Amino acid sequence: MKIFSAQQIYQADKSTIQKEQIKSDDLMERAANQLFEWLHSRLRGTQVNIQLFCGIGNNGGDGIALARMLHEHGYSIKVYVVNYSDKRSEDFLLNLERLKDLKVWPDFINKESDLPEISPNDIVVDAIFGIGLNRAPDDWVGSLIAHINNSRAFVLSVDVPSGLPLDEAPWNPDYVIQASYVLSFQLPKLVFFLPKTGVYVNQWEVLDIGLNPDFIANTEADFELIGRPEVLPLYRPRLKFSHKGTFGHSLIVGGSYGKIGAVQLASNACLTVGSGMVTAFIPKCGYDALQTAVPEVMVLTGSRDKYISGIEVPFQPTVVGIGVGIGQDDDTVSAFCAFLKKNKSPMVIDADGLNILSQNTEMLKDVPEMSVLTPHPKELERLIGYWDSDFEKLEKAKAFALKHNLVIVIKGAHTITVYNGKGYVNTTGNPGMATAGSGDVLTGIITGLMAQGYAPVEAAIFGVYLHGLAGDMGASAKGYEALKASVLVEHIGNAYAELLRQPEVEQKETN
Ligand SMILES: NC(=O)C1=CN([C@@H]2O[C@H](COP(=O)(O)OP(=O)(O)OC[C@H]3O[C@@H](n4cnc5c(N)ncnc54)[C@H](O)[C@@H]3O)[C@@H](O)[C@H]2O)[C@@H](O)CC1
Ligand SMILES: [K+]
């Protein structure tokens, strides 16, 4: 699903109004209807107090129109107009009149007003600001927002949590609604998925208000949300007359004394995701452990016992995954440097492999184009420098990826794969996956997918999704806390099965 900027959403609104020859308040009516249906189908007439806080723009207009529909269906409502400006939108004013026609009189909250009482049992509808927010809310509006947040009521935000700008960090983190649920129009917003702004969104859902599908299809978005429909077409089925050579020979280079497990996890994941063959290159100390733990993996060792030195490999691998558990010993740095100069295979680079690159930036020119880098935030910062906000981080990562023609996988709750100026936002995974070795498994997965012929950016997008899905299935079997990285590997097969499972409706249709 595409993720649009605020500007693109306004354009989509406009093109819909033009194409369908409707008025803008018709579109607002549609939006409010969807909000109403969502709420009504859950409440089914339950008598609960619904307090609607409406701004004076179109987001407020949505709230006022919703209030009318709730009133017409007998719900107990209280409407407040948050009167932060005298530049009221036409559709807001129109809907205010329609509400007054029903003899519903909103209270106006101004600078000097007392804040209304909100009980934890109330439902709050937050329609104060939408995507039009372009500066810090005034302090008295901020106090109202903080008051709503402190009420412990269920807060339903219309389109976006009020106070959250779409393309920069909030001016004051306390002046943003903590939404229990966000009903967002047509397309999800990028801020729902970024670490600093996603915290304001507990749950979200998109409401289809029928914005012009041609416009959406033909407009290039900077970000895309990656769910099952986006991942399924990337899957490469295994053909009957294939053999292990068809699926490539991966080389995993990594490990040091005490960190051989990282290679075990990566090479096991690489095999499990479907690489035809996997060879691991490790220091001598890990030989017995690795051969015993994963007998299907072939093992080569360097000349030193505890650290990798001189990476000599007597075959040309299809793809190289390098860096897990590798450490930063001087010999290892020189071995990595020399290996980069002679290596001809595409690469996946992780962990200390990335830290070595950050400290020896001249090595970057020898990294093959289209290689996949998989940094966590600290590793990314070492590579691209400090950022002030998630937005700056993404811009810097995009610029770095473009400059070196690389794929960068920014790991996090919603991992974002950046390539060729675009960002792909993952939707699978859970907090249980914040555990040692989880990243090693991801490196193995992406390497193993590239071995099978997935293009690097597809391997990254597909691999991140599958890794998260394995985590979700692992968590439902074991719970978050007990989810170890080895459990992720165990669930790779289940994740494939889940991804490829025909939904019940489709099954019925084909029967
Ligand atoms: N345009 C359309 O056709 C549709 C718009 N919809 C709603 O319209 C919303 C956007 O509406 P608007 O563009 O009117 O914007 P908002 O309702 O988000 O904000 C209202 C106005 O307040 C002003 N403003 C911004 N920051 C401020 C601040 N800190 N203090 C005081 N004033 C401030 C701006 O001039 C802005 O236009 C969407 O989020 C969505 O809820 C929906 O009704 C669907 C259809
Ligand atoms: K809102």
Image (cartoon, rainbow, N blue to C red):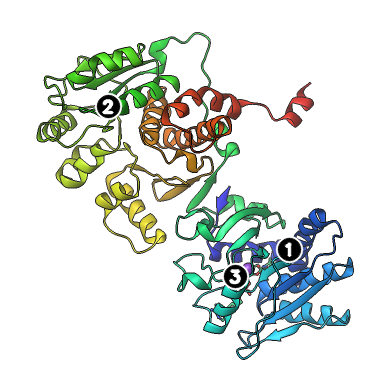
Mark 2: which amino acid?
A: Ser
Respond yes or no on whether mark 2 lies under 8 Å from ligand 1.
no
Which residue is at 61% across, 84% downward?
Answer: 84
Cα separation, mark 1 vs mark 2, equals 52 Å
Q: Position of residue 128 (x, y in %)?
A: 64, 74
Instruction: Answer with left or right where residue 168 lies relative to residue 52.
Output: left
The vertical placement of 454 against 418, above or below, is above
The vertical placement of 361 against 331, above or below, is below
Q: Residues within 10 Å of mark 3 (few under 14, many from 20)?
A: few
Q: Which residue is mark 2?
A: 345
Which mark is nearer the camera, 3 or 2? Answer: 3
Q: Which residue is mark 3?
A: 150
- For marks 1 and 2, the one nearer the N-term is 1
Which residue is at 54% across, 28% downward?
Answer: 495
Marks 1 & 3, CB-CB < 8 Å contact: no
Respond yes or no on whether mark 1 lies under 8 Å from ligand 1.
yes
- Regarding residue 320, the answer to whether it shows in the image is no
Q: Quadrant of residue 271?
A: top left
Marks 1 & 2, CB-CB < 8 Å contact: no
Query: What's the mark number on residue 31?
Result: 1
- For marks 3 and 2, the one nearer the N-term is 3
Mark 1: which amino acid?
A: Ala
Mark 3: which amino acid?
A: Asn
The vertical placement of 416 against 131, above or below, is above
